[in-house]
Amino acid sequence: MSLALSSPAAQPSRTARLLRRLRGQHAFLVGAGLLVLIALLAVFAPLLAPHDPYLQNLAQRTIPPVWYAKGSWVHPLGTDQLGRDYLSRLLYGARISLLIGVSVVIIAGLIGTTMGLLAGYFGGRMDMAMTFIVTTRLSLPVILVALAVVAMVGGSLWIVILVLGLLKWDRFAVVMRSATQQVRSQDYVAAARAAGASTAHIVLREVLPNIAPQLIVVATLEAASAILLEAALSFLGLGVQPPLPSWGLMISEAKAYMFFSFWLIAIPGSALALLIFAINLTGDGLRDVISPDGRG
Amino acid sequence: MTDTILDVRGLSVDIATAGGVLHAVRDISLKVERGKTLCVVGESGCGKSMTSLAIMDLLPKGARRSAAALSFAGEDLSRAPGKRFNALRGNRMAMIFQEPMTALNPAYTIGDQLAEPYRLHRGASAAQARDRAVYLLDKVGIASPAERLGQYPHQLSGGLRQRVMIAMALMCEPELLIADEPTTALDVTIQAQILRLLADLQKEFGVAIMLITHDLGVVARIADRVAVMYAGQVVEEGPAAALFSDPRHPYTRGLLDCIPVPGRTARGGRLGAIPGVVPSLVGEVHGCSFRDRCPHARPVCAEDPPAREVDGHRWRCILEKAA
Amino acid sequence: MIAYIVKRLGLALLVALAVSALAFFLIRLSGDVATAIAGEGARQEDLDIIRQTYGLDRPLVVQYLSWLWQTLRGDFGTSIYFKTDVSSLVLAKLPVTLLLGLTSLLFALVISIPLGVLAAVYSNSWIDRLALGVAVVGQALPNFFFALCLVMLFSITLRWLPVSGSSTWLHFVMPTIALGYYVAPAFMRLIRAGMIEVLSADYIRTARAKGLPARTVIFKHALRNAVVPVVALTAVQLGFLLGGSVVIETIFALDGLGYLAYQSITYKDFPVMQVIVLLLSVIYVLLTLASDIANAWLDPRIRVA
């Protein structure tokens, strides 16, 4: 047994070790489980939704969910002010939120990691320039700039994604920069350089894989923040446009009915909170595993 | 008034760890006489720091103290509440630590931190505390003490900070000063100065000192009595002269062989080293814990060794005389 | 210290300049301003007249420089929708937003400092878990949803607080809670982590060895050191608060800068938009500048070097 353990071939890989540590993290398991569940619901929304989310039926407006006396299983979560099935809209809404989260993170991640890599790897003026750009970007109030640009260009799902993606790269850049600086000073990078590897090769093959875990953590946090921002923009009427079932937009449209039908707000609001909760829990769990000492 | 300022009997410290309960200190007994110096020696990890922290009721979270008796100036503190210790600490018993670089709060001036215990325990005014601080900074050999009061810890060197720590410990004229490896983190020349300072201060103020160290050279110079700790136990304890001239426990002898003695160690001769490692103290521990490294070990050492005593010189070993 | 401040001031100036350019070009390049003023489907002649009156036919860079020059002199132009002087408009609303920012920050600190400290002192106890729960919920709740829940509870169900407006202090209660709770989790986590780290420091043991009572050790010796990073976070969070005020002021029709920003955005009132973006950015720049200086001052290792 001890022989098998000490032979290098039998040593668990880095990934396997991470996975094993993750399994001990209850919070992470709950978060990731919830996240996978929501993602499945979103992907299979066309199969799961009991009705067409856009089909209006003015005769069946604001039917309460099934747990109210007037509710029924025909519309488990009731109908909205235009008689559309609320469960179906909720399921399709998950697609919008997840699409926003993923797309914004991809755009912002590409911009931010590139900037951070360049600044961290080359240092000097490149680093000073990036620090200045990041400082400037941080000074801009994201929500206000996003609102203004969307208002001038005209709101749509893709505009929102693009605007948020172009605004939310700062944390990627900062994390990537410091991580690259750390990795750069390590032996194996010096070894690669001594072995005659090109800069691009070192960056892509040696630096990037080592920073991947931290990047995933930033990605989860930024995805949550992007989803919340989209919801806020749509809530203010300057994000995703009707009749798309964005959760923020659903809350906005139901605002006038909150006095009598608060569930119209509570249901998408809770869905949003649950999704953010799941993402945050996953991200925090990952962070604890990557740096077990750096709790809190 | 008794002559014994500190009388510890049957002291144990257990630390809860992920791997089980670590018995860091196991049933030890110690005495410090008024105005005298007890040196506690041993390798790192032998429980000597835990012993001092347990006496001061400063154990970290997760560490638990139990003692048959913990008498300070005749008062048994083994079951005293934290409040009682608060009233004694910094007042009648004081402590200085190993790391002078980090033992002072970076956010407050030296003067602030010096004044704190004096104002707390003596109800002194700011001006009185200031005067006392200046007096003691001068006593511990700090030049222009009045100006130092306004400085922050980061402006002082390690040696100066340890002097400040000593002055701070002496603010309320304690009867007992526990010094946990006070010179380990310092340069060799500074080490000698600090030790001389401690000895001088003891003469002047009559404070009893319990000095924790792993440096036998230090012990030889200032100890009245010596306690040798190994794996959480006191394996030998006695008057310094007797212990150095006639060590009874094989571990003590091993330690003594490890230090060069001018005139006794041959030039170019090999210094002794004790082979082997300290046993784990997690879980149940039985028998003599030194037996794995002891040149005189026998099967009977797997049982707890007998406690022996001759003229106030105590040791725990199957051997009665040095072999 | 002086050299540090001068250097930091220079950076702040440069950032402010860059921000002014962004505030101007982002909004200008996002859409045609003349169309925004005249409305969709306006005739070409009308658009040309508008371009001439507002000087929009000049090159964009020239427009930016003249706008910057006027802004620096305190002339923020005229609002297209409100038809009044932008500077007096903005100055009238600014106090409400600053007041809301301060009360929210205060609210956030009042709940996060005690909870963060207790969570650190009694880590892994029920109070630690409670604090974690409060933080996790606060981070997951969208602030506009939380605001609507408050309205439902305090205005509709309990009828304690007015739904909208800004005439009395009662109008500030719900916006303060909504906005304060939004930024509190970050403080709580930072304070908890900082306190846990500081409480295990050697100087805390020294403080205990002096016989100081627990509250002096925790509040004088530990919190004083754990609070240093909180100052830096405060500036960042105040920036968040100002951004969040757009959403919260709009919900509660609280007549501040955030609500004005929302109105100007919906009416495409670009002179007002530009000035508010610039103003909030410059406030943020000043806040971080102040916090960096405060940080240097709080840490004697930097202050007395």
Image (tube, rainbow, N blue to C red):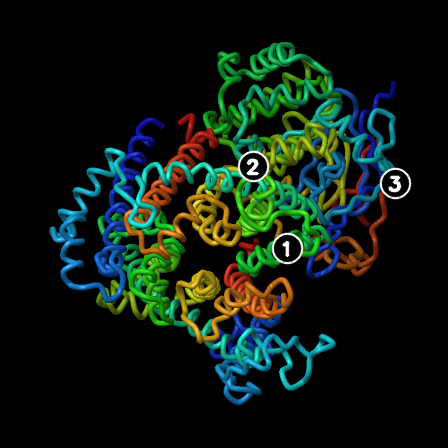
- Specify the quadrant of the image occupied by residue B313: top right
Q: Which of the chains bears the disc numbered 1?
A: C
On residue C132, the disc is 1
| Spatial separation of the CA atoms under disc 2 and disc 1 | 57 Å
Residue B48 visible, this angle: yes
Say left or right for C208 vs B138: right
Q: Which of the chains bears the disc numbered 3?
A: B
Could you tell me if the residues under marks 2 and 3 are in contact, i.e. CB atoms within 8 Å?
no
Answer above or below: position of B162 versus A208: above
Q: Which of the chains bears the disc numbered 2?
A: B
On residue B260, the disc is 2
| Spatial separation of the CA atoms under disc 2 and disc 3 | 39 Å
Specify whether disc 1 shares its chain with disc 3.
no
Say left or right for B172 vs A220: right
- Of residue B187 and residue C125, the one placed in the foreground of this image is C125
**Residue C111 in the image, given as x and y percentages of width and height:** 63, 44
Residue A21 visible, this angle: no
Q: Residue at x 24, y 58 (%)?
A: C38
On residue C294, the disc is none
Say left or right for A187 vs C213: left
Q: Residues within 10 Å of mark 1 (few under 14, many from 20)?
A: many
**Residue C251 in the image, given as x and y percentages of width and height:** 51, 54
**Residue B95 in the image, given as x and y percentages of width and height:** 67, 29
**Residue C70 in the image, given as x and y percentages of width and height:** 21, 38
